[in-house]
Amino acid sequence: MGANREYKRTIFTELFSDAKTLLELYNALSGSNYSSDTKIEINTLEDILFMDLMNDIAFTIDGRIIFLIEHQSTISENLPLRLLLYISRVYEKIVDKKAVYRQKLIKIPVPELIVLYNGKASFPDEKTLRLSDAFKEAPERTDVFGNLDLTVRVLNINVGFNEDIIKRSDTLSGYVTFIGKVRDGSNAGMELRDAIIDAVKYCEDNQILQPFLSNHASEVLNMLTTEFVLEDAIAVWKEEGKEEGKEEGKKEGKEEGKKEGKEEVKEYILSLLASGCTAEELKKILSQ
């Protein structure tokens, strides 16, 4: 089943969808101070040539840096591999394919990769994931042939984590506050829809993420409901995978069962969305 850009539309990607907010976000995360006239070119994989592999945000800064951002509510150990595929595709978009066969060195933007995590599971302030951890065997002599590695910085952006970084960006700070309020309401026993509406009202009263939340209230409700339903579905899948693994008593079978279960959940949800199912309808179906 081919991917659809609509599935990647989230409140996070909508908030950071223009040059101004992207530059604000980069300055906050990197500690840089690029001026407002810095050239930003968005390179997110979203056109028809890349429909089978789509990332959240990718953009170049002054033609010197490629910044890839993934926003995750669950952390996968395969993120370095995914980002390797993403960055390869982005280079494919911006580099003249014929130029790679020239003798003269081609100068390309430096890749910088980050994952912003805001899920429910416990996670430290920051963690680095490495592609080399996925290699089947570590060679005894790494200087004999060329080799490859890739590191991904993962930041926890839940309320109470990395506050010094988050406060550098009003948009990011507002997003963190908004999601935190939704989770607070949900954890207090409110229906998800009511928790979202209550959080929107709180943000309106306190001039947080305005006018975005006011102008996109219905979209925010649908997008966030879908995001949270998917997050809960994955959490259920993980628990079921653990139980199945315990019953089978075989690690290999457990991992395979978890992998297959995850794909089934994703495919099912995406098929419902593709058929025109709304977020509220999706929630009812998955709760049955």
Image (cartoon, rainbow, N blue to C red):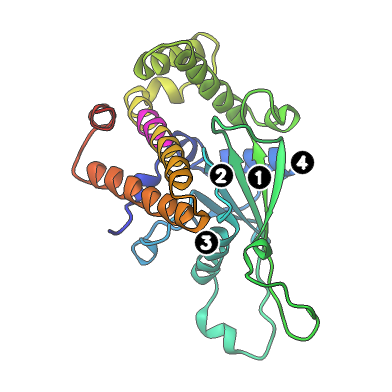
Q: Is residue 260 left or right of residue 109?
A: left
- Residue 213 sits in quarter: top left
Q: Residue furthest top?
A: 205
Part of the protein shown in magenta: 224-231
In the image, which disc is placed on residue 86?
3
**Which tag, 3 or 2, sits closer to the chain's start?**
2
Identity of the residue drawn at 68% across and 87% down: 104
Marks 1,2: beta carbons within 8 A:
yes
Magenta stretch, main secondary structure class = helix
Q: Read off the residue under disc 4.
A: 31
Task: Return the x and y of residue 58 as percentages of the image width and height.
Answer: 54, 53
**Quarter of the figure with the N terminus:** bottom left
Q: Secondary structure at mark 4?
A: loop
* Quadrant of the image occupied by residue 49: bottom left
Question: What whole-number distance in Å separates the C-alpha atoms at marks 1 and 4?
Answer: 16 Å
- The mark found on residue 52 in the picture is none
Which callout, 1 or 4, points to the residue nearer the camera? 1
Q: Amino acid at mark 1?
A: Val
The residue that disc 1 covers is 154
Q: Amino acid at mark 2?
A: Ile
Q: Is residue 187 magenta?
A: no
Counting residues from the start of the chain, the first of labels 4 and 3 encountered is 4
